[in-house]
Amino acid sequence: MPSLAGSGRPGGREAPKMKSLLRHGLAVCLALTTMCTSLLLMYGGIGGGGHPEPRQQQQQQQQQQVAAVPSRPPGRGQQRPALPVGAGLLEGYISVLEHKPLKMHCKSCALVTSSGHLLGSKQGDRIDETECVIRMNDAPTRGYGKDVGNKTSLRVIAHSSIQRILRNRNELLNMSHGAVFIFWGPSSYMRRDGKGLVYNNLQLMNQILPQLKAYMISRHKMLQFDDLFKRETGKDRKISNTWLSTGWFTMTIALELCDRINVYGMVPPDFCRDPNHLSVPYHYYEPLGPDECTMYISHERGRKGSHHRFITEKRVFENWARTFNIHFFQPDWKPEPLTVNHPEIKPVV
């Protein structure tokens, strides 16, 4: 038996270590609880998460719009050019702790939506076979693996979803080995001068979980997302009282990241106009939640307050799929070809 000399009782050496681990665990729990509380107070005070920009910041950001002009896409049927040395460096996505740009590239991606259309789809194995799997917000995999897969390479998260991410941190943070997390939010919440509450909490979270690959979208990049929405739809996001959805950010990021994108669970833009359309929950993990089409239509028609324009965004995605290597599954559909050829602009900000 090993010697226990110096211990007043068996396991004496382990006791201080155990106490140290317990203290560390309590400290982590306390810090994360504090983060949840501060975020809850913030969102309770502002009435939920939107994408507004303070007027002062808007004036500063308008000066940066000159650089937000994307390049043109390859012609139809052409392949993207070979990546140069050092490619895969994605500007505008900055690591929370080190402030370095994200370096990531995938030949094929599965972009998994949170739609109820995925329930019973049995697409999990097909999704997990893809090189990179992209998910959104707090959409879980545990208990839904047969339909949505278990693998996660990248998760795009709205500032308003951080509370739910922290509540489910054991699955979404601790168990996501090697996954990259990109957080987006209004510049006023993400500023790095000590006044950005969301950024401060992300920094604290990343210090507690240093293995976490946490990134945020820069203020300049957020402005480019707005500019892209205006170019593609003809609508000014602020004037039209529009909140860009996490789906908008995720699809655009995927175009920068992936050579081929397989989208799972996204309906075509006119799906909800069919009176006989299939009724599914808005989120596959909330079976008793709101109906997907009801949510889409109410947001699309909303005029008072700010709303997501889900159907408008899907028309843009449909148009991008006519030029780029984007494919839709569950439901399976392809965009119909246009009768008139319009010049396309590469939707990469």
Image (cartoon, helix red, strand yellow):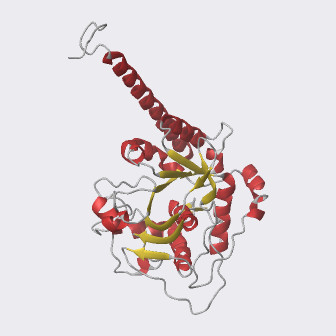
| 238 or 226, nearer to the observer | 226
Left or right: residue 313 compared with residue 129: right
Residue at left 34%, top 62%?
148
Quarter-of-image position of residue 28 = top left
Q: Position of residue 283 (x, y in %)?
A: 37, 61
Judged left or right of residue 87, residue 130 is left
Task: Give the quadrant of the N terminus.
Answer: top left
Q: Determine whether, in the image, residue 6 is placed left or right of residue 203.
A: left
Residue 235: x percent and y percent? 65, 71
Q: Which residue is found at the position 47% from the left and 55% from the top?
A: 155
Splitting the image into 4 quarters, where does residue 27 fall? top left
Asked if residue 118 shows in the view, the reply is yes
Query: Seen in the image, is 349 located left or right of residue 48?
Result: right
Residue at the bottom extreme, as displayed: 339
Residue 20 vs residue 188, the one in the foreground: 20
Residue at the left extreme of this rendering = 1
Pick the quarter of the image with the C terminus.
bottom right
Q: Nearer the viewer, residue 286 or 44?
A: 286
Q: Quick check: can you spot residue 238?
A: no
Numbered circles on residues, count:
0
Residue at figure coordinates x 41%, y 56% from the top left: 152
